[in-house]
Image (cartoon, rainbow, N blue to C red):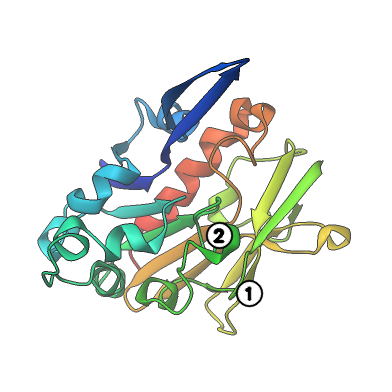
């Protein structure tokens, strides 16, 4: 059985200015941040649609029928403004459906939602991701902080596994490769929430992988990246990398 997954975000454009003595010139680069995940899911039972950040402004569905085409939605490194301010609103002052409320309703009627970490996930760099106190946050198993929530770990870290028998960790054993950062979040106080993995206590004990329920649906957070820079190259090449994502997506798509 094929599980249809929509990955939203994980792209950006870099504009650079080069100075060489008296002269200067500019260059622009487009980056895709989800290549390790895309490669890990190739040939699997997970059919991935990759909607880049700039495509999502107009391309993310405005109606429930569009979301119903998918079993799981991943929001990764994309701020709330991209879905709140499509061109029709930002440039033409028209009204459109609130897609954050649409996501919440979709999860509550049985969808699976995953938010992954990054500079524009949760509250993000300088607090600009702005997922705090949104409808999307309401269906996550964690809440966002009201400020810049990045936890940079240049010395590296490996997680403490609290629930080795959780379905999201099936077939994964041994020491995990190094990670370089996470978004700090706060756990909701609910009985249906499982903290599967977290950072070591001496590095804050921050949640890393948390699962929960929302209405008839399921939600989860992975507070680190899905690729560099917070995930090291060794992590992305690790045998457990593909297993981890397939397990998470499988858990989110399952029905109670």
Secondary structure of residue under mark 2 = loop
Secondary structure of residue under mark 1 = strand
User: Between 148 and 200, which is closer to the camera in this rendering?
Assistant: 148
Quarter that holds the C terminus: bottom left
From this viewpoint, which residue is outermost toward the right? 202
Looking at marks 1 and 2 on the same chain, the residue that comes earlier in the sequence is marked by 2
- The residue indicated by pointer 1 is 186
User: Between 254 and 179, which is closer to the camera in this rendering?
Assistant: 179
Q: Position of residue 103 (x, y in %)?
A: 28, 67
User: Between 24 and 160, which is closer to the camera in this rendering?
Assistant: 24
The structure residue drawn at horizontal position 25% and vertical position 43%, both measured from the top left corner, is 55
Picture layout, residue 96 above or below residue 34:
below
Q: Position of residue 66 (x, y in %)?
A: 14, 56
- Which of the 4 image quadrants contains residue 203? bottom right
The structure residue drawn at horizontal position 65% and vertical position 42%, both measured from the top left corner, is 230
- The residue indicated by pointer 2 is 124
The structure residue drawn at horizontal position 22% and vertical position 62%, both measured from the top left corner, is 90
Residue 111: which disc? Answer: none
- Confirm whether residue 157 shows in the render: no
Neighbours of disc 1 within 10 Å: few (<14), some (14-19), many (20+): few
Q: Nearer the viewer, mark 1 or mark 2?
A: 2
The structure residue drawn at horizontal position 59% and vertical position 62%, both measured from the top left corner, is 126
Quarter that holds the N terminus: top left
């Amino acid at each position: 059985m094929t599980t249809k997954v929509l990955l939203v975000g994980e792209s950006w454009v870099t504009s650079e200015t080069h100075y060489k003595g008296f002269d200067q010139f500019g260059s622009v680069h487009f980056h895709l941040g989800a290549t390790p995940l895309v490669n890990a899911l190739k040939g699997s039972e997970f059919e991935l649609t990759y909607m880049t950040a700039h495509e999502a402004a107009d391309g993310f569905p405005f109606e429930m029928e569009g979301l119903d085409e998918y079993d799981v939605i991943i929001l990764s490194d994309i701020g709330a403004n991209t879905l709140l301010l499509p061109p029709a609103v930002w440039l033409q002052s028209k009204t459109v459906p609130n897609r954050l409320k649409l996501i919440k309703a979709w999860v509550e009627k049985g969808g699976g939602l995953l938010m992954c970490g990054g500079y524009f996930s949760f509250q993000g760099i300088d607090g600009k991701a702005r997922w705090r106190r949104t409808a999307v946050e309401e269906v996550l198993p964690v809440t966002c902080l009201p400020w810049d929530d990045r936890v940079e770990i240049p010395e590296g870290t490996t997680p403490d596994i609290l629930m080795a028998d959780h379905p999201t960790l099936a077939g994964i054993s041994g020491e995990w490769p190094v990670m370089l950062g996470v978004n700090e979040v706060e756990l909701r106080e609910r009985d249906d929430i499982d903290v599967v993995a977290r950072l070591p206590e001496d590095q804050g004990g921050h949640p890393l992988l948390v699962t929960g329920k929302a209405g008839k649906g399921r939600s989860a957070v992975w507070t680190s990246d899905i690729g560099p820079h917070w995930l090291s190259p060794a992590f992305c090449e690790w045998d457990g990398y593909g297993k981890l994502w397939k397990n998470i997506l499988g858990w989110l798509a399952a029905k109670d």
